[in-house]
Image (spheres, rainbow, N blue to C red):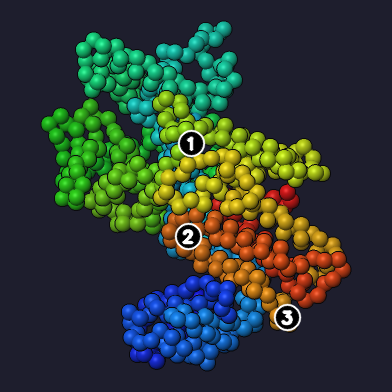
């Protein structure tokens, strides 16, 4: 039980016994430096259930705590604040429990409980992954790791949006605009003369942009001939041809399906390279081209039961107006499916495949908030009990100093380019700081990648998922402040301390339980208090689906440790007194907790920097 949990229980007992009142919550804050104490209880917040002078109330509760709680040795009251002093024995007991657990904070997975499925990435197969996808992947992967660390079984998955009008746009543009090679065949990732297009997802994305360029030219021509902009959007020949291609695909036209399969496999190969470089993976993959059929089946059943209805043009809709929403189309008038169709089918198929799943988390940008409101409501109307446990992890967009990214116009930050650039930036800054003496070329390359990816991931994950991000690559790679490299550097510093201790102070490095034989410094207590919060922090992060809680906790822990490191000796010459022994062990636990915390964020930590 944490310090706050212990005191909370005792304070509630005190209020019940002394004032015959029930206190729902106990508010804490850090003790101000000018007052004695290790933790402060806010008495003011109790006045809503206890009437009286806050100093008198604090004094009564403080005396109760001293009398009843073993490790509370003294207290003082300043206005409405009860400052509590703890015995050093409490900190030693807490610390020895922490240092004995190599997986500190991680709860074992309970197999017989409901599992959670986390969906992330879920790209369209008409373009490479970009910075927006990077935030999606990092959030989804980290959330899955945090939920697992809280004790639940997790399945990581994605739905690959491999069908639809956007796919046909790339296919049609490739047919029209791809040059022929010397063999008379159109260019592929293996035959292209453009080195930037040898990765399949980039080649397909290139033709998606080419489609948009041609589409805009045709629109301009139609508008010049007297058409309205809305008419031009619908009547542009290249768009109409793409729509016809989609209809042929859904009718299983052999040539269209063959081209679709070929170009999608180019994209899959490209995606796999990006996922590997980014350090994310999946337990299962679903394809819209398969799950939309199941969605159609259940929509047909829903038509019979009144969940859906047909309009005169034969399109199928769900009327959600009585639920405060509007009417939502699920099948177009030409019989083709929409995103909602496949999302219905995908959700149902996942539960069929993984019956132990009790809930699903969809990691999707906040521009789709309404879509998921509708999806979850439709699934409830279809009678699925698990629909009440569906959650949309809605995150804010990623902006650049130059403005918003636009895939159709090709003004995006490519994920592969970003990863490479982050590593290059890490190299430049590391060399400028002169931090890499004695490294081989391969060791330097590995370290640059570790620092660059760590900077990227931490910069994105430290922000509350709901907030937009203005991404500044150079700002993210800084060895000072709330950044990934700063925390990585502290971890490497700790490993240096441990290596030195192992060489010169073997007893300090391998000590067992630390005995209560010395007086603890306030900075040592501060580190232990931070460490003690880690298990509860993981549970809170899992409940809130927020890697930002883990990221910023790790930074706070590092700040407290660095303050200790700068003010108290840890390894000095041949001296190995009890204090040195304790601080070496404390350093070891801090390093372990940093490593675990960063692993939950998908970030590696270097042994030396």
Marks 1/3: CA distance? 53 Å
Mark 3, residue position: 518
Sooner in the amino-acid sequence: mark 1 or mark 2: 1
Which of the 4 quarters of the picture holds residue 11?
A: bottom left
Identify the element where label 1 is drawn. loop
Q: Is residue 540 visible?
A: yes
Which of the 4 quarters of the picture holds residue 51?
A: bottom left
Sooner in the amino-acid sequence: mark 1 or mark 3: 1
581, 113: nearer the viewer: 581
Q: Position of residue 168 (x, y in %)?
A: 37, 23
Please report the residue visible at 42 percent of the width from the left and 48 percent of the height from the top. 467
Residue 441 drawn above or below residue 214: below
Q: Position of residue 584 (x, y in %)?
A: 74, 67
- Label 2: how many residues lie within 10 Å, few (<14), some (14-19) or many (20+)? some
- Label 3: how many residues lie within 10 Å, few (<14), some (14-19) or many (20+)? few
Mark 1, residue position: 401
Marks 1/2: CA distance? 30 Å
Identify the element where label 2 is drawn. helix
Mark 1 or 2, closer to the camera: 1
Please report the residue visible at 31 percent of the width from the left and 19 percent of the height from the top. 239
Please report the residue visible at 36 percent of the width from the left and 39 percent of the height from the top. 291
Q: Give the side of residue 336 with respect to residue 486, left or right.
A: left
């Amino acid at each position: 039980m944490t310090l706050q949990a212990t005191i909370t229980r005792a304070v509630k007992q005190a209020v019940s016994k002394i004032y015959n009142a029930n206190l729902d919550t106990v508010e804490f804050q850090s003790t101000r430096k000018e007052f004695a104490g290790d933790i402060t209880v806010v008495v003011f917040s109790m006045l809503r259930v206890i009437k009286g002078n806050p100093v008198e109330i604090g004094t009564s509760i403080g005396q109760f705590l001293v009398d009843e709680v073993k490790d509370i040795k003294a207290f003082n009251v300043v206005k409405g604040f009860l400052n509590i002093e703890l015995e050093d024995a409490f900190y030693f007991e807490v610390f020895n429990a922490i240092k004995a657990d190599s997986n500190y904070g991680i709860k074992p997975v309970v197999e017989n409980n409901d599992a959670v499925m986390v969906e992330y990435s879920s790209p369209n197969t008409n373009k490479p992954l970009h910075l927006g996808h990077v935030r999606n992947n990092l959030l989804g992967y980290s959330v899955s790791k945090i939920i697992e660390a809280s004790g639940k079984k997790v399945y990581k998955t994605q739905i690959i949006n491999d069908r639809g009008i956007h796919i046909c746009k790339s296919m049609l543009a490739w047919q029209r605009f791809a040059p022929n090679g010397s063999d008379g065949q159109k260019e592929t990732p293996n035959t292209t003369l453009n080195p930037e297009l040898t990765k399949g997802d980039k080649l397909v994305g290139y033709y998606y942009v080419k489609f948009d360029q041609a589409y805009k030219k045709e629109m301009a021509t139609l508008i010049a001939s007297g058409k309205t902009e809305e008419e031009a959007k619908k009547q542009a020949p290249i768009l109409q041809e793409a729509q016809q291609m989609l209809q042929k695909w859904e009718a299983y036209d052999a040539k269209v399906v063959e081209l679709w399969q070929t170009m999608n496999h180019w994209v899959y190969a490209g995606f796999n390279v990006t996922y590997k470089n980014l350090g994310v993976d999946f337990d299962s993959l679903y394809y819209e081209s398969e799950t939309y059929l199941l969605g159609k089946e259940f929509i047909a059943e829903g038509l019979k039961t009144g969940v859906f209805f047909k309009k005169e043009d034969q399109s199928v809709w769900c009327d959600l107006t009585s639920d405060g929403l509007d009417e939502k189309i699920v099948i177009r008038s030409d019989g083709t499916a929409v995103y909602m169709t496949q999302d219905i089918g995908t959700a149902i198929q996942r539960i069929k495949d993984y019956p132990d799943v009790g809930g699903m988390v969809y990691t999707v940008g906040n521009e789709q908030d309404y879509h998921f409101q509708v999806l979850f409501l439709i699934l409830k109307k279809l009678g699925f009990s698990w629909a009440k446990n569906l959650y949309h992890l809605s995150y804010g967009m990623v902006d650049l100093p130059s403005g918003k990214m636009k895939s159709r116009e090709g003004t995006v930050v490519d994920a592969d380019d970003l990863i490479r650039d982050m590593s290059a930036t890490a190299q430049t800054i590391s060399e400028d700081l002169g931090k890499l003496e004695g490294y081989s070329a391969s060791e330097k390359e590995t370290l640059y990648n570790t620092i660059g990816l760590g900077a990227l991931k931490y910069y994105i994950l430290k922000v509350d998922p709901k907030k937009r991000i203005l991404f500044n690559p150079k700002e993210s790679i800084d060895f000072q402040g709330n950044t990934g490299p700063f925390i990585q550097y502290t971890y490497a510093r700790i490993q240096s301390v441990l290596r030195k201790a192992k060489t010169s102070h073997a007893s300090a490095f391998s000590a067992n339980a630390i005995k209560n034989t010395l007086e603890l410094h306030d900075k040592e207590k501060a580190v232990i208090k931070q460490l003690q919060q880690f298990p509860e922090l993981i549970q809170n992060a899992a409940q809130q689906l927020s890697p930002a809680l883990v990221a910023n906790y790790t930074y706070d822990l590092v700040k407290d440790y660095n303050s200790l490191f700068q003010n108290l000796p840890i390894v000095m010459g041949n001296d190995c007194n009890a204090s040195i022994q304790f601080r070496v062990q404390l350093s070891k636990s801090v390093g372990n907790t940093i490593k675990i915390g960063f692993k939950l964020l998908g970030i590696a930590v270097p042994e030396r920097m």
